[in-house]
Amino acid sequence: MATLKDIGTELGLSVATVSRALNGFPEVNARTRDRVQQAAERMGYRPNRIAQRLVTGRSGMVGMIVKIRPDMSSEMTFFEILTGLTAALAARDTDLVLAVDQADDPVVPYQRMLERGILDGFILNAPVPDDPRVAWLQARGIPFVMHGQSDAQVDYPFYGIDNRAVMADSVGLLAALGHRRIAFLNGEVRLAFAADRRAGFRAAMAAEGLAVPEAFIASDQPGESYGYARALAMLSGRLGPRPTAVICASTVIAAGVMQAARDLALAVPRDLSVMAHDDALPQLRAINFSPTLTVTRAPMREACVPLANHLIDHIDGVAAARLQTLIRAEVIVRNSTGPVPEGGHDPWH
Amino acid sequence: MATLKDIGTELGLSVATVSRALNGFPEVNARTRDRVQQAAERMGYRPNRIAQRLVTGRSGMVGMIVKIRPDMSSEMTFFEILTGLTAALAARDTDLVLAVDQADDPVVPYQRMLERGILDGFILNAPVPDDPRVAWLQARGIPFVMHGQSDAQVDYPFYGIDNRAVMADSVGLLAALGHRRIAFLNGEVRLAFAADRRAGFRAAMAAEGLAVPEAFIASDQPGESYGYARALAMLSGRLGPRPTAVICASTVIAAGVMQAARDLALAVPRDLSVMAHDDALPQLRAINFSPTLTVTRAPMREACVPLANHLIDHIDGVAAARLQTLIRAEVIVRNSTGPVPEGGHDPWH
DNA sequence: CTGAAAGCGCTTACAG
DNA sequence: CTGAAAGCGCTTACAG
């Protein structure tokens, strides 16, 4: 592998000049720069990242800890993030080091990764309220960015969607169609995003003057069978009055709800309106549902670009306050939502 | 962060001695070693990996390229491998850098990763026959290990299961139960493992003197719906004589076959024997099937230990010939296989 | 048993 | 505009 010294020797220049030429310093003579660049090209020069990193004190590597959950939806999401993130980081000359969390203590895997001593920072995901990882990393001055933050009142970089707005938009859309009995199949409420959505749902329902029976809110790991089972229970009437509309935390859950509707011979949207939040997972596209699914939409993969940039900018010294992005999900009305059945029309009777 | 120099200054020793003490060189005085180790502990010393790597010429990082396939089974498998691999690599003080392959050319992502200049080697997976990545990496002298190799006649390190033996064992077990019409729902034959299994299936059937109608072999990305659809087609009799036993390339496929059997009111194993190869994915355990599934079994996660060690040993200079592991899957007879229906008993008539 | 020195391949003040 | 030198934090022959 050619080094700066090799190029310098070849051209009768010092390594300092070669380094400057290659790094585009303005003071180097234009002809010198050209000669250096051509020689570098010809000799197949590649900078030794390790050496660069030793002197700059940066490793060019960031870490992410993934938690195994036996749930397809989180795996699809993880793949999507992995795709977007590795591309976005590579554009900033940064590598992603992964580890799998199998521990109980939330900070242990971070500590273990840090001890290996080669990380500039972390990408955190799946925040919980008062996430213990935040305090731990902040106490040690380790840069990080939080993915999925939806509360803007924090002092660290994050990227997330406004989950309260998601629920306000969803409830608003259904209420405008006349629905008053709206159910919500949420994700796991121990996660911040789901807690925020639950709060958002309650607030939006209250704002519309609508009641929220306990049976209308469920929460679990996203999965088709969860959606199916809960929808079946709610729609069978076993749990009390039946909802005329269901909001799902994800398209995976919506797939289960749709199946339950089919099994109960309910037509969507005539008998039941269904909508979901859509992370744009390629395996389960809202547009392929039958009928096509009304959603609030915020793609995961694209989100990885600002996510990666926030982290690297923060490592570069940009203040956290300037690295906080809260985006509003897009509302896309398709064919799974419609007016409430007349007079609370009950197709079972 | 404390350095060797800090410890040396503290103790009145040279960095060389401190380095030797910490690295367990035999020549250092026992008391000196103790003092150094205590000081290192007290001062929270962590070796700077970057500096170590600059001088040793090793980065302590290996790469893996994952290919996105919109198929749950490959995602479950990937998670399983990620879990085992990061743990096994960490035990050898090595980090895993991941990238996602979205290109057409199979070597492009490897080239791109290599250009970033910080990898000691690669873990390859999902080999195809005459895999172009092999020649490309060998031409450049880049160490790698192949996961899923099942042909031992190669000159590079690998870990894999003997796929021909898998089929010989499966066919042998069913033939011993009297089955003569055995179908095989294979994976994608463009992948080496599936090509090997197909060859193994044909050879094993021939050895038993059994015919293999074209309709009895299918091949596709593993998935429940594939298993369901193909089993339904075969068992309906539309494609000719019906099989009395089905071998599945994975438990995911077997889940689809079981569902098809249920929908056709066929009892397993009375009317149909079902078996599968089992990668021991925690999300879909053979023991949770009803009836419990007879399998050939070779866990993915455990396989990552020898896989990681082979690669690192190879980077350390161990000859490829000593780093080739071909294991035989275990045959586990459970309740989904039984004697062939009497006289080729046909439950449909 | 320990130390002084060279070196891994870069970057970057400091001189000229 | 270019070069000589110091330095990033280690490892490891080479002396003593």
Image (spheres, coloured by chain):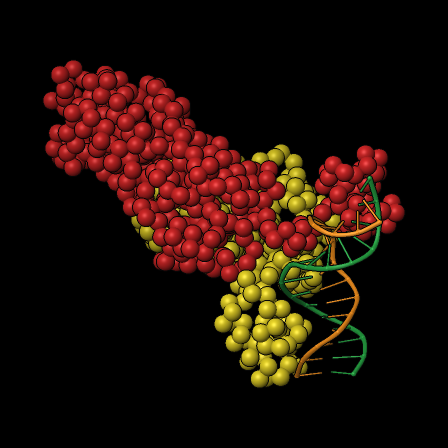
Chain colours: A red, B yellow, C orange, D green
Residue at 29% from the left image edge and 37% from the top image edge: A196
Residue at 49% from the left image edge and 57% from the top image edge: A113
Across and down, in percent, residue B122 comes to: 62, 51
Give left or right: position of A60 versus B134: left
Q: Image quadrant for the C terminus of chain A?
A: top left
Residue at 16% from the left image edge and 15% from the top image edge: A342
In the figure, A265 relative to A41: above or below?
above
| Residue B34 shows in this picture | yes
Give left or right: position of B182 versus A210: right
- The count of marks equals 0
In the figure, A42 relative to B286: above or below?
above
In the figure, A18 relative to B3: above or below?
above
Across and down, in percent, residue A312 comes to: 54, 42
Task: Kindly indicate the quadrant of the structure image that contains residue A186.
Answer: top left
Across and down, in percent, residue B342 comes to: 35, 47
| Residue A78 shows in this picture | no
Q: Nearer the viewer, residue A139 or B178?
A: A139
Residue at 40% from the left image edge and 30% from the top image edge: A327
Q: Nearer the viewer, residue B246 or B76?
A: B76
Across and down, in percent, residue A341 comes to: 18, 17
